[in-house]
Amino acid sequence: MNGGPRIVRDVRRSEPVSFTFDGSRIEAHAGESVAAALMAAGVLSFRTAPVDGGNRGVFCAMGVCQECIVEAGGQRVESCRLEVREGLVLRRVTYG
């Protein structure tokens, strides 16, 4: 998604960082949550559902629903509660 939904006019941003999600490089800003950075990059599906394999992403955006979990270093974490950092490597959680 070129430009993404980030507001860029008259906004001071923290320093840029990049991380990878499923092998794709994602540009973000220090201090953003992984969920916010992924959505800004146009990524809306972070995992699949265990029963029907349907796509899942951000729902509550505060770490309660666990819909936005991703895999980081072999651990499943809520992307809305994980802050981006340079070189972070994440994977989509899939079931089945």
Image (cartoon, rainbow, N blue to C red):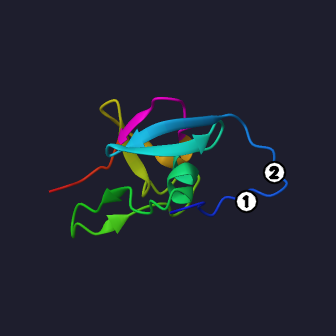
Residue at horizontal 53 percent and vertical 39 percent from the top: 82
Q: Residue furthest right?
A: 10
Q: Which x, y percent locates residue 35?
A: 52, 51
Q: Indicate the quadrant containing the C terminus: top left, top right, bottom left or bottom right.
A: bottom left
Above or below residue 94? Residue 71 is: above
Above or below residue 51? Residue 10 is: above
Q: Which residue is mark 1?
A: 7
**C-beta proximity under 8 Å, tags 2 and 1:** yes
Kind of residue at badge 2: Val
Residue at horizontal 42 percent and vertical 58 percent from the top: 67
Residue 23 falls left or right of residue 32: left
Q: Residue furthest front?
A: 2
State whether residue 63 appears in this view. no
SS for callout 1: loop
Residue 16, by quadrant, is top right
Q: Nearer the viewer, residue 79 or 26?
A: 26
Q: Which x, y percent locates residue 45?
A: 39, 61
Magenta span: chief secondary structure: loop
Residue 8 falls left or right of residue 60: right
Residue 31 falls left or right of residue 34: right
Residue 27, by quadrant, is top right
SS for callout 2: loop
Instruction: Look at the image and give the residue range highlighted in magenta.
Output: 82-90
Kind of residue at badge 1: Ile
Residue at horizontal 53 percent and vertical 58 percent from the top: 39
Residue 57, by quadrant, is bottom left
| Residue 84 lies within the magenta run | yes
Q: Which residue is mark 2?
A: 11
| Residue 42 lies within the magenta run | no
State whether residue 75 appears in this view. yes
- Residues under labels 2 and 1: Cα distance? 7 Å
